[in-house]
Image: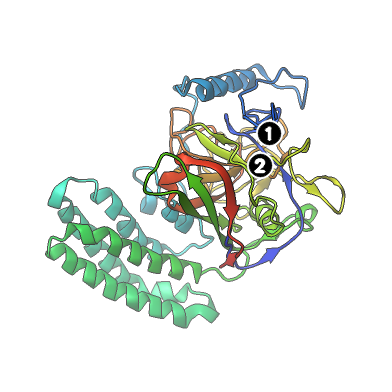
Amino acid sequence: MVAIISCNSYSPLAASKWINPTLPTKASTFLTTPKYNSHKHVQCQLQNGQKGRPFSLKECAISIILAAELITGIPSLDAYAANPPLPDLSVLISGPPIKDPGALLRYALPINNKAVREVQKPLEDISESLKIAGVKALDSVERNVRQASRALKQGKTLIISGLAEAKKDRGAELLDKLEVGMEELQRIVEDRNRDAVAPKQKELLQYIGDVEEDMVDGFPYEVPEEYKNMPLLKGRAAVDMKVKVKDNPNLEECVFRIVLDGYNAPVTAGNFVDLVQRHFYDGMEIQRVDGFVVQTGDPDGPAEGFIDPSTEKTRTIPLEIMVDGEKAPVYEATLEELGLYKAQTKLPFNAFGTMAMAREEFENNSASSQIFWLLKESELTPSNANILDGRYAVFGYVTENEDFLADVKGRFGILPQLVFF
């Protein structure tokens, strides 16, 4: 694996165990990744209650269902996923589930500026408009552009007032560029040039994302005292992962850009950054690619995670989940265990290439180094309502070339630079 990371603030310190998705879990858990041979094939293994805390009949049933899906590829659970409540800004972001990783990251920023969201929403909606066949899509796109332009004119002062003081000048420049860009997009629509819409939309959303990032003024909360000595990512970082691609005559290797979100998962993302900086993942095998997940992070030898040289023990991290509407993550418990059955997570398993920690199924704080990327949306994992959210710690998304994730093979490398922003 090769990586480039970027973020606002990073504090190097600790690591943890992992979960293997079958769903993803570590050697003896919900989804598990036990070591069977030197090739480390990950298989589905149901637990018999011998390890970890006792589990209920309900948990046992869910484990069996998850295992069945991973083995057969056919979802067998129809009605388990609950319908989550709408978030605070639901009026602005209601509609089909958000599956674009860039949009998920923009909405996950710790800001509360309705004016900028009112500009962002119709620009994001252009993606839905472009699903309409032919040039008919441009009528809907035109409505999106007009709505965004009107929102920017009406809300520009409020947007600027929401910028961090040290970033106001840069933010104002970005808004000027956004305004010009929307005029250019309007002309593209008038010229009926459908092919030029998506690239221009991407450019405008980049401006929006940069403006929203400039609204974040420092890290928004205190990490609990018991985790402050762990490696922390207080902001965001980008990592590039280079992996071989199978059965593609036009592409031998692919570089995946991964954005890590330390605002919503500072301990989990910080752990990964620390392991990247230690070159822990360099040359490691991709240990599982089954159409449901891509998984890696199990080192050679008997250890199932990262052995911290300072303690000579496996370093583990707590389960860390940011609930939408809350100011800080919850730790060490699943949302189900907390009774938050309908809560929505800030970083959901919505996008192809959602990145999370694998862990032992019934050991919430067992994640260490094993990571997985979700590939498959099924009846068990539908966007916005699935049984992965609130059970596994999401800490990033693949934002570039994610469509090739299902075709990776062999060893991977993380490029050496870390880009913090």
Label 1 crowd (10 A; few <14 / some 14-19 / many >=20): many
Left or right: 79 as drawn, with respect to 151: right
In this orientation, does residue 1 appear? no
Q: Residue at x 65, y 67 (%)?
A: 9
Residue 326 position (above or below residue 294)? below
Residue 119 position (above or below residue 56)? below
Q: Which mark is residue 75?
A: none
Q: Which residue is mark 1?
A: 26
Left or right: 203 as drawn, with respect to 191: right
Mark 2 falls on what kind of element? loop
Q: Amino acid at mark 2?
A: Gln
Q: Residue at x 41, y 72 (%)?
A: 159
Q: Residue at x 17, y 45 (%)?
A: 133
View extreme (bottom): residue: 169
Could you tell me residue 67's position as x and y percent?
57, 22
Q: Residue at x 39, y 80 (%)?
A: 173
142 and 278: which is toward the camera: 278
Could you tell me residue 395's position as x and y percent?
58, 50
Gap between marks 1 and 2 measured at Cα? 8 Å
Q: Amino acid at mark 1?
A: Lys
Q: Which residue is mark 2?
A: 370
